[in-house]
Image: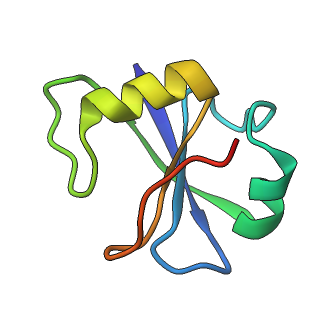
């Protein structure tokens, strides 16, 4: 699965991962407002075998398939999804 990574211009080390480039349609408005301006950073092929620094790739894929996005917060903060 291709994964598109956006960083928050206003919240350091906060990233939004999407399965489709520039498609924020499934991201709740409340999260978009808190996240602020989303700046495209890079894309990569996400597989269950790929090593990620802060998250389990299986969980990231599951969240992106179920919710349409994955929110990664700075280290030390609880990673969660906004319903």
Q: Position of residue 62 (x, y in %)?
A: 42, 23
Q: Position of residue 42 (x, y in %)?
A: 46, 49
Question: What colour scheme does the image use?
Answer: rainbow
Left or right of 39 on screen, residue 57: left
Q: Residue at x 51, y 68 (%)?
A: 14
45 versus 17 height, above or below: above
Q: Residue at x 65, y 62 (%)?
A: 39
Left or right of 38 on screen, residue 29: right
67 versus 32 height, above or below: above
26 versus 55 height, above or below: above
Q: Residue at x 48, y 30 (%)?
A: 63
In this view of the protein, which residue sits in the foreground, 49 or 41? 49
**Which corner quadrant holds the C terminus?**
top right
Q: Residue at x 27, y 27 (%)?
A: 58
What is the quadrant of residue 7 in the picture? Answer: bottom right
Left or right of 15 on screen, residue 30: right
Residue 45: tell me if it is visible.
Answer: no
What is the quadrant of residue 18 in the picture? Answer: top right
Q: Position of residue 4 (x, y in %)?
A: 51, 39
37 versus 72 height, above or below: below
Residue 48: tell me if it is visible.
Answer: yes
Q: Position of residue 33 (x, y in %)?
A: 83, 64
């Amino acid at each position: 699965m291709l994964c598109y990574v956006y960083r928050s211009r206003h919240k350091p080390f906060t990233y939004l991962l999407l399965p489709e480039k520039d498609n924020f349609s499934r991201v709740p408005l409340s999260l978009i407002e808190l996240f602020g301006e989303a700046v495209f950073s890079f894309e990569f092929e996400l597989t269950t075998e790929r090593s990620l620094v802060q998250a389990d790739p299986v969980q990231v894929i599951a969240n992106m398939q179920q919710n349409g996005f994955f929110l990664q917060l700075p280290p030390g903060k609880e990673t969660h999804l906004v319903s």
